Amino acid sequence: MLIHPEEIMETIQMVRSEHLDIRTITMGINLRDCVHPDIDIFNKNIYNKITHCARDLVNTTEEVENLYGIPIINKRISVTPIAVVAEGCISTDYTSIAQTLDRAAEDVNIDFIGGFSALVHKGFTPGDLNLINSIPGSLASTEKVCASINVATTRAGINMDAVAMMGKIIKETAERTRTNNGIGCAKLVVFANAPEDNPFMAGAFHGIGEPDRVINVGVSGPGVVNSAVRDLDDPDLGDIAEAIKKTAFKITRMGEMAGREVSRRLDAEFGVVDLSLAPTPEIGDSVAAILEAMGLESCGTHGTTAALALLNDAVKKGGAMASSYVGGLSGAFIPVSEDAGMIKAVERGSLNLDKLEAMTSVCSVGLDMVAVPGNTSASTISAIIADEMAIGVINRKTTAVRLIPAPGKDVGDLVEFGGLLGTAPVMRTHPYSSEEFIQRGGRIPAPIQALTN
């Protein structure tokens, strides 16, 4: 790959002034060869496999970071969904497995480990139920473990029994982590159409179709895109789309270059580059700021969904030209607590939960890092999940919900998480009940396109 000196100087400028970074290098690890009916032996097996495979992950990533001069913010691991590999264990409580994952993550010095997960879009197995019921205790007793549950797909429809269950699990997880503002819920995500190669937390897991070890890269760069848009001289929307495409191309090339070097040094497969624009609480490193640079007075006002659609499409087009291995979620994230512009929009009243839901129909994920009052009912949480799952299922895209019913907090309060998780303003939910709808259970059938093959 030939790189012109001007590109090098441009990249240095992006790093220094525009918050450019590679958000994560995530190693996926297959745990299917760790299966054992004795949970103690199983835990020993997974600890040994993870620490053996990832023992050099952090050092190698830091070497590549220094080689290219590009910050790599997080080093992470994803594993085979635990509900799958733990099903043969005699024990029904999987909390010790989460604690083993946490200890392995600590010992190899990574930031997060994902894969305390289950895929229940068409129904439950005993292992799925064991894992789901273990989530509150597991997230309350670990620091680095992330959990995800896939409750819907375009081909299967929506498992409303799982949706109802997850409302209760989210409430219990918040209560079990009450002293830390319900932070356990920040490590728990509910999916429709979950991808098997997502490097971003909390939804990363190592899919069944993946190789034994794989390196997936999650790039970032909202600050760079924001600067590129603001530098344009009286552009029309086509000019803006073109500028975003070119910027996404550069960001993706950088991410692939670093990821391939890490995978080569670790003798692991190279997987995908996830193109997602992942914001941070830093001023300017914001997806909301990009939308406002297009001409919106405040994110959330009329026109926001159209502007986000333009951004998401341009990012995908630019990234797809830079890599043949684009995967994961790939697009624009809109996590409220992690985006300074989103936080301001909520505080000034231009952005509410209904508008966020509309925006998720055209962006990468869904309702992400959204805080709601601590007294929000489990059925209301489930109904919010159901709405988001419907958007994903009907539109054949990934959607997700990472919702925090903040204990003791009410509308207008702020919930502090710190670091990349930022600050979440508590948002208003509708006061009317969805209890009867949620209690009906069953499965919302798949849309008709699920029958194509």
Image (tube, rainbow, N blue to C red):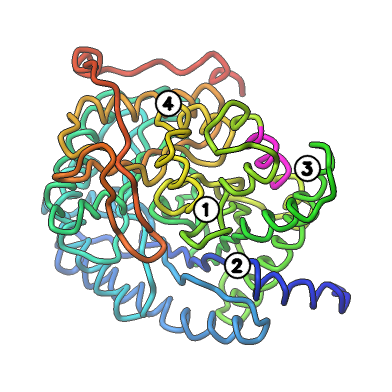
Per the image, is 178 magenta? no
**Kind of residue indicated by mark 2:** His
**Kind of residue indicated by mark 1:** Asp
Q: Which residue is mark 3?
A: 241
Image quadrant for the N terminus? bottom right
**Kind of residue indicated by mark 4:** Asp
Q: Which residue is mark 4?
A: 354
Locate residue 421, reporting x and y percent.
37, 58
Magenta segment boundaries in residue numbering: 307-315
Element type where label 2 sits in the image: loop
Q: Residue at x 70, y 45 (%)?
A: 316
Q: Going from the N terminus, do you reach mark 2 or mark 4 first?
A: 2
Residue 197 marker: 1
Distance from Cα at disc 4 to Cα at disc 3: 26 Å
Distance from Cα at disc 4 to Cα at disc 1: 29 Å
Q: Residue at x 55, y 17 (%)?
A: 451
Q: Going from the N terminus, do you reach mark 3 or mark 1 first?
A: 1
Locate residue 208, reporting x and y percent.
45, 50
Vertical side of 4 occupied by 146: above or below: above
Q: Residues within 10 Å of mark 1 (few under 14, many from 20)?
A: many
Picture quadrant where residue 47 is located: bottom left
Q: Is there a contact, CB below 8 Å, between mark 2 and mark 4?
A: no
Vertical side of 79 occupied by 380: above or below: above
